[in-house]
Image: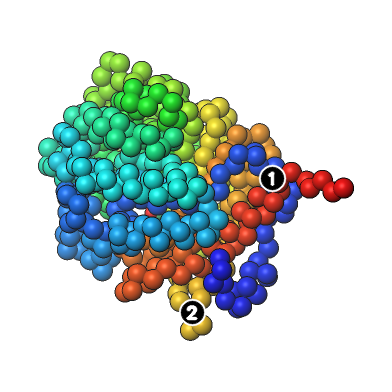
Amino acid sequence: MSNISPRQRTRLAESPSIAPERLAALPADFRFGLSTAAYQIEGAAHEGGRGPSIWDTFSHTPGLTANGDNGDVACDHYHRWPADLDLMVDVGVRDYRLSVSWSRLQQSGFGPLNGEAVEFYRALLEGARERGIRPLVTLYHWDLPQPLEDAGGWPVRATAERFAEYAARTVAALGDLVDDWITLNEPWCSAFLGYHTGAHAPGRRNWAEAVAAAHHLNLAHGLAVAAIRDAAPEALVGIANIVTDIRPRTDGPADIAAAARLDAASNRVFLDPVYLGDYSAQVRSVLGDALISVVRAGDLDVIGAPTDFAGVNHYQRVIAWHDDEGGPLRLGERPAEPATTSFGWSVIPESLTEVLVRVAREFTALPIHVTENGASFHDYLDPAGDVVDLARVEYLRGYLEAVTTAVERGVDVRGYYAWSFLDNFEWAEGYGKRFGLVFVDYATQRRIPKLSAHWYQRLIAERMSQLQPARITA
Ligand code: IFM
């Protein structure tokens, strides 16, 4: 970036990049991207015909988010997107994973799309393409229209059908500008944080409802794949699942079984039906009647319809142990050490390698994109006006090296989208948790590229120069 300060330049020179031979192991078409989601950055909650989503309701309910924060303004990206895209180009990024807001496109969750929202997203996507940025668009990143929650939400089968209609209409309206679609982001969070722990919108606490939600989210994905294929036969389609590296606390059989139960209820319940065409015996036994009672004949064929790539979001290694008092899964869990992000999440790059190797070996031979990976740290604007996020630079280096290790071990990884482009509304944690490579001063909406943005820019430039054919000299 043109505006790097001399001090940042020195810190950058001291921050190692990825060794050229490791970088060279990545496929030629590997994408170095950045990721965001609509509710976390757009703001303009009451503009452009947008309707309320479950996150508006949740974040406006006292006591449910840190400091009572909400996404009403967020990064004001709705108004600032041209400058934000210019900044992305400045960072050297040409691959951008974003989401479109269901409650902006369809206020009540059904019927014709809101014309103003279509206009907004068409301008944004055209703006991206004009700048040479390839968009990867997620249809659902948690902003369920509130009227659909009022009608029962994800525990109700009809919500999956509404989602497929929304997907069909949206892809028909925007499909000429998008080559790659993601149906759902992290359905585990929507189902289990939304309907079991209540930490996320809509904040319900009912195990059976969470399990029903999980199945209906899987079904929504499958129905949407078919809808996208109809509306845009050339498009590539996938789903972004969070895949957690789960380890037992001890080698004892009780802890090993507890880790397997957690794996079933967080990873396998979503990976099994999409990639293997059925819920495994382990998932069926852990989720029991709550699952079996909502699965209808034909659902698994719908959910298992072929996709074109696998999205893997990865954040954590988690330690699990047996605990009879530990809720429906009878277990306890905690982040593995070292748990050094400001969330207290683990920083263990090898976990990403393990997860990628596992997905490739146990679930699918499809190309994989790491559709999210990143960390929140206590970033601040220092007196010199810089954000020196050395911990994030180390994090990115470690996790990107972990991707190259997976590639060296034979996994077909085609992209890495760092979470996140900008600091943003981190759901129940509000604005206190900063994941961006670009710092946002929320009082002024000024964007300040952190050291990590400069580091990522240099890495991408190094990669580009590797790809240039050697100059022939006379
Ligand atoms: O901010 C979230 C994102 O919306 C979904 N994946 C995890 C991120 C960090 O918590």
Pick the front one: 94 or 345: 94
Q: Is residue 170 left or right of residue 261?
A: left
Residue 443 pos. (x, y %)? 31, 74
Label 2 crowding class (10 Å Cα cut-off): few <14, some 14-19, many 20+? few
Observer able to see residue 34: yes
Image quarter in which the N terminus is found: bottom right
Pick the front one: 17 or 473: 473
Observer able to see residue 249: no
Q: Of callouts 1 and 2, which one flags the residue occurring earlier in the amino acid sequence?
A: 2
Q: Residue at x 42, y 68 (%)?
A: 447
Mark 2 lies on residue: 385
Q: Is residue 241 above or below residue 274?
A: below
Q: Is residue 99 above or below residue 46?
A: above
Q: Residue at x 48, y 40 (%)?
A: 312
Residue 114 pos. (x, y %)? 19, 42
Residue 254 pos. (x, y %)? 46, 40
Q: How is the image coloured?
A: rainbow
Q: Residue at x 47, y 43 (%)?
A: 134
Q: In the image, is the residue at mark 2 within 8 Å of ligand 1 by its beta carbon? A: no
SS for dot 1: helix
In the rendered structure, find residue 467 and report the number of the disc placed on it: 1
Q: Is residue 249 left or right of residue 214?
A: right
In space, the residues marked 1 and 2 are separated at their CA atoms by 35 Å
Label 1 crowding class (10 Å Cα cut-off): few <14, some 14-19, many 20+? few
